[in-house]
Image: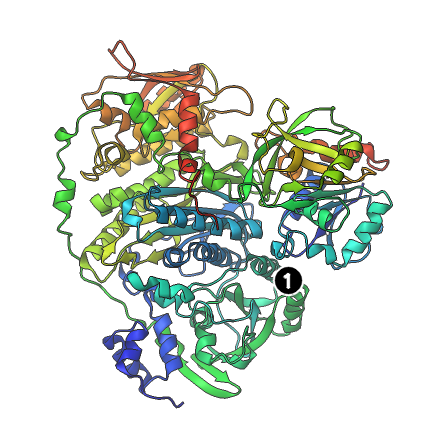
């Protein structure tokens, strides 16, 4: 399964995603420079974390105007899986591929630590191999991860089961305490209505290899592989 | 070359003495113009010339079988095998961080990163060592918040993880906080780049941010003491742009990969001046620049402003002939400004032109090698006897040892720093093996089985009581931290923070500290490969304690061999390596519990230290040791508490321990909270105990089996006693230790 990893000026988790896809999962993976315009031949896209355009103006706000984004929209419309992680999620919001917006963390500070998320929907290409309701331990690292949407949008997200991950306690309870950034409804990740575009604040690529004993992040990449006709072993 | 004569106040404004100005006149054979005076001023500043420290720094051992690049370049490089080198350096940004904490700290990170990637290395880890006054004072909270957000703002955006560090709090830093930043990168051994301008006729290319009017005379500012007027110095602090630096990093590494250049130097302190002069100096060449070609932020900038600006995120390259176009096109791809602004000459002179007109013409050597070197007078401080001579008999032993331990765990110097490190991205690049909050940070080296352990350390209380011992202990403790993680120390970098060198007492502290560092390095066979000196940490006549900070790097041959500091498994035996003596001088205990700073700092015998470290490392490499944690601030009591707290696993409760301390003829508070050196708390499986005993006996290392891991409480009893001195639930200690610093910011924290 051929993965494309978008690289904007200021992307900095591009190498980490590449490392997981290429070296850990043995998949063909390539960097795609943001000035490129074609996405022909790719089976899935990853928009990695980092600080595209230095987060200047607003996170993801400038990246959405990069030349490659037109093709990303077409790719998504055609049903291709697109995974936006952290800044990638922010870019997907700015590009209108996912609904809602990001506010600064409740603490107004950058937060880097492990959190727990509960998998709310396992009928997406990114979660298909995960048991329903499973709790994953994943790292977050962001200053703007406080997801917000108006009540109507939230209602629709719920109705169409677009909320994929929610912050929770180690036991899987959704509590205010477990919510690291003040995100609406404890939302950590959402997908589009078709389910093929996922944005998530936690970094699954940072805990796929098990350097510190945790491989929970791997299940998300594995889902993409197992779900996709080309990816199946 | 025309110019008006320089009035005496002009010389003084440039931070030069009359004698130094006379030296310039003699060397040039004429009066310098204002631009030339400015060039001398920055190149001869303490910051750039090391004029007060040079004679002492020569004592440091810098050679070793692994050393690929010692001091003198942008950073040191040490061979780690597999064709790779670790490139690292530590640097201070104290003065700017006090004037403007966010930008001061941010540009400190930016500067050290450039030092590393200038060498052709990709930075993979940042650490920092910070000193502030007590957090009870609002200004200090403001400074800590600003500095931490500045470090986070820059490092996070660059995608370089900040994996560790240390922070100490002491009133002596109220007016002079310290911000020392360490960076390590990885390069191919045969592809290290140096800051040298070679090849007459080669093109000199400027890349990066445009030059503005910021940071003019930053190097001179960093070479002066402070008084009330510091607010007015804010314009001398630069403003960081990490996004541009990220582009600069990627562009430089791409240019280096293509082998398109002969030399490269970042524009740090003294900007375009030091970069061009130092490159020509090292290359034994001259350099000619056309200043009208320098990309500028605003119109009407004078050559003086262009040459002395410390605008950040700029590099100077010397192109290989024929590759100029390729370099410029790489910069274009990364949306970076780039311009050919001069060439290498054979004149050994710095010639600056503006629109073809010569505006400065100085022999390179006059700016570099001819800079003044001072053997400044030294004198033993008069306060020393009073400070060392406190009568410990008058210090009452505590009635509740448990309360003392809880109190120490909440001392901001000892307490967990998660309030700080959670603001740093410490996981990006996915190499972090041991996260911040431990004594060493460990990152694996991708593409190999290896990992690198890093630690920054220094104790200024020891330093003021006995600068020599302070220097020795800084090196030994940093090395001990590395050993505890399973690493073999392979090199260090030092950041020497001191007061005003024109004071003989300060020079005495400096000279002795350096001697201490040098002696410890020789005994432990660890070379100093890079470093930085920061003098003039003095405000209104009050200088800081001598604060030498050591950044130590160790090699772990197999990443799986990394050893954590926290207890591992129930039933493991707790063993103390080394000897506990009655040493309370200069301890955190004395300061925090009894509000006294004095006495003699703990003794350190280098031969003993060496054998303890060797013994511990060999036992780790033999796979016997399951956890290792050294005794430092707060002594054995705090070390045991931390080992219990840090035993936290992904799931399940943490492990406490039951400890019985053998009877010693010393005070009980010294036994538990004294800071005797050369001690490590390790745990081993019961079955491995004889092997460890055998090894310690063979190497003459004192060891005592003092307890057993288990339960969820830490219980410490003295041999012969019925009741324990300390009996605390681990969770209670953890909560106190973990929340202590954050508690200062719950209300009234200043948000930026």
Quick check: B453 above or below B714?
below
Task: Give whichever of A123, B343 is nearer the camera.
Answer: A123
Quick check: B256 above or below B169?
below
Query: Viewed as shown, does residue B597 lie left or right of A115?
Result: left
Query: Viewed as shown, does residue B547 lie left or right of A205?
Result: left
In the picture, which quadrant includes the N terminus of chain B? bottom left
Label 1 SS: loop
Q: Mark 1 points at which residue?
A: B258
Q: Residue furthest toward the bottom?
A: B2
Crowding near pointer 1: few (<14 within 10 Å), some, many (20+)? few
Q: Mark 1 lies on which chain?
A: B
Name the colour scheme: rainbow
Task: Answer yes or no: is residue A89 visible.
Answer: yes
Question: What x and y, as percent, mark residue B444?
Answer: 55, 40
Q: What residue sits 25% from the left and 74% below the top?
A: B17
Task: Give whichever of B453, A156 is nearer the camera.
Answer: A156
Q: What residue sits 60% from the left and 26% below the top?
A: A169
Question: What x and y, as percent, mark residue B514?
Answer: 28, 51
Task: Answer yes or no: is residue B702 visible.
Answer: no
Task: Give whichever of B570, B703 is nearer the camera.
Answer: B570
């Amino acid at each position: 399964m051929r993965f494309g990893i978008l690289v904007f000026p200021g992307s900095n988790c591009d190498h980490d995603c590449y490392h997981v896809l290429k070296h850990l999962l043995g998949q063909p993976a390539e960097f795609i420079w943001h000035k490129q315009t074609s996405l022909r031949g790719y089976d899935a896209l990853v928009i990695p974390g980092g600080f595209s355009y230095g987060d200047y103006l607003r996170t993801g706000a400038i990246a959405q105007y990069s030349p490659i984004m037109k093709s990303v929209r077409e790719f998504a419309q055609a049903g291709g899986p697109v995974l936006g992680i952290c800044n990638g999620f922010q870019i997907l919001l700015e590009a209108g591929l996912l609904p809602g917006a990001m506010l600064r963390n409740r603490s107004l500070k950058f937060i880097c630590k492990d959190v727990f998320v509960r998998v709310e929907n396992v009928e997406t290409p990114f979660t298909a191999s995960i048991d329903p309701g499973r709790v994953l331990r994943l790292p977050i690292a962001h200053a703007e991860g406080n997801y917000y949407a108006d009540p109507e949008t939230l209602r629709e997200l719920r109705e169409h089961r677009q909320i994929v991950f929610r912050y929770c306690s180690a036991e899987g309870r959704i509590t205010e305490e477990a919510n690291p950034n003040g995100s609406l409804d404890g939302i950590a990740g959402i997908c589009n209505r078709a389910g093929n575009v996922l944005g998530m604040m936690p970094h699954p690529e940072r805990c796929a290899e098990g350097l510190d004993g945790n491989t929970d992040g791997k299940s998300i990449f594995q889902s993409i592989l197992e779900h996709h006709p080309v990816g199946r072993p | 070359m025309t110019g008006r004569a320089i009035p005496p106040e002009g010389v003084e404004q440039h931070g030069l003495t009359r004698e130094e100005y006379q030296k310039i006149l003699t060397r040039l054979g004429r009066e310098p113009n204002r631009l030339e005076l400015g060039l001398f001023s920055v190149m001869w500043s303490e910051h750039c010339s090391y004029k007060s420290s040079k004679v002492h720094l020569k004592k440091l051992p810098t050679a070793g079988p692994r050393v690929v690049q010692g001091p003198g370049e942008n950073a040191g490089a040490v061979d780690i095998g597999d064709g790779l080198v670790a490139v690292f350096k530590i640097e201070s940004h104290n003065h700017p961080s006090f004037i403007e904490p966010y930008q001061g700290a941010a540009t400190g990170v930016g500067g050290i990163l450039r030092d590393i990637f200038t060498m052709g290395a990709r930075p993979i880890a940042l650490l920092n060592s910070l000193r502030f006054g007590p957090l009870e004072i609002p200004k200090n909270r403001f400074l800590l918040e600003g500095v931490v957000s500045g470090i986070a703002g820059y490092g996070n955006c660059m995608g370089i993880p900040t994996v560790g560090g240390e922070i100490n709090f002491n009133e002596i830093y109220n007016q002079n906080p310290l911000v020392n930043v360490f960076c390590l990168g990885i390069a191919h051994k045969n592809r290290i780049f140096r800051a040298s301008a070679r090849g007459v006729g080669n093109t000199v290319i400027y890349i990066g941010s445009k030059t503005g009017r910021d940071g003019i005379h930053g190097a001179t500012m960093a070479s002066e003491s402070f008084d009330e007027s510091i607010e007015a110095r804010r314009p001398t602090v630069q403003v960081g742009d990490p996004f541009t630096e990220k582009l600069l990093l990627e562009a430089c590494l791409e240019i280096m990969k293509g082998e398109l250049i002969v030399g490269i130097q970042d524009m740090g302190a003294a900007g375009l001046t030091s970069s061009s002069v130092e490159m020509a100096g090292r290359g034994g060449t001259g350099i000619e620049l056309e200043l009208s070609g320098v990309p500028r932020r605003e119109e009407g900038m004078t050559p003086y402003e262009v040459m002395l600006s410390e605008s950040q995120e700029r590099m100077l390259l010397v192109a290989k002939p024929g590759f100029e176009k390729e370099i410029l096109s790489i910069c274009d791809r990364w949306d970076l400004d780039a311009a050919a602004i001069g060439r290498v000459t054979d004149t050994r002179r710095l010639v600056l032109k503006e629109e073809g007109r010569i505006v400065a013409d100085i022999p390179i050597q006059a700016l570099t090698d001819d800079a003044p070197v001072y053997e400044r007078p030294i004198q033993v401080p008069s306060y020393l006897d009073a400070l060392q001579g406190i009568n410990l008999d008058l210090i009452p032993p505590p009635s509740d040892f448990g309360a003392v331990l809880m109190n120490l765990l909440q001392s901001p110097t000892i307490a967990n720093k998660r309030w700080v490190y959670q603001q740093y991205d410490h996981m990006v690049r996915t190499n972090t093996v041991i996260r911040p909050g431990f004594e060493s940070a460990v990152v694996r080296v991708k593409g190999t089985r290896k990992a690198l352990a890093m630690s920054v350390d220094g104790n200024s209380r020891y330093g003021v009581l006995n600068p020599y011992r302070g220097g020795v202990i800084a090196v030994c403790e940093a090395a001990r931290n590395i050993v505890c993680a399973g690493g073999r120390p392979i090199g260090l970098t030092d950041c020497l923070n001191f007061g005003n060198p024109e004071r003989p007492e300060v020079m005495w502290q400096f000279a002795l500290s350096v001697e201490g560092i040098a002696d410890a390095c020789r005994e432990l066979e660890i070379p100093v490969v890079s470093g930085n000196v920061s003098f003039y940490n003095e405000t209104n006549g009050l200088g800081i304690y001598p604060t030498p900070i050591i950044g130590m790097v160790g090699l772990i041959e197999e990443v799986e061999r990394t050893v954590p500091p926290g207890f591992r498994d129930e039933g493991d035996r707790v063993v103390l390596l080394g000897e506990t003596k009655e040493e309370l001088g200069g301890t955190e205990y004395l300061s925090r519990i009894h509000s006294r700073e004095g006495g003699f700092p703990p003794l350190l015998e280098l031969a003993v230290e060496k054998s303890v470290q060797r013994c511990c490392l060999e036992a780790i490499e033999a796979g016997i040791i399951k956890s290792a944690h050294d005794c430092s601030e707060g002594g054995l009591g705090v070390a045991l508490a931390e080992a219990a707290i840090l035993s936290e696993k992904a799931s399940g409760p943490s492990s406490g321990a039951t400890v019985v301390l053998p009877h010693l003829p010393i005070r009980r508070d010294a036994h538990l909270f004294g800071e005797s050196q050369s001690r490590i708390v390790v745990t081993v499986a019961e079955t491995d105990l004889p092997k460890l005993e055998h090894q310690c006996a063979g190497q003459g290392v004192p060891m005592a089996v003092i307890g057993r891991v288990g339960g969820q409480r830490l219980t410490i009893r003295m041999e012969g006693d019925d009741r324990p001195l300390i009996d605390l639930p681990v969770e209670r200690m953890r909560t106190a230790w973990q929340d202590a610093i954050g508690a200062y910011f719950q209300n009234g924290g200043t948000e930026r």
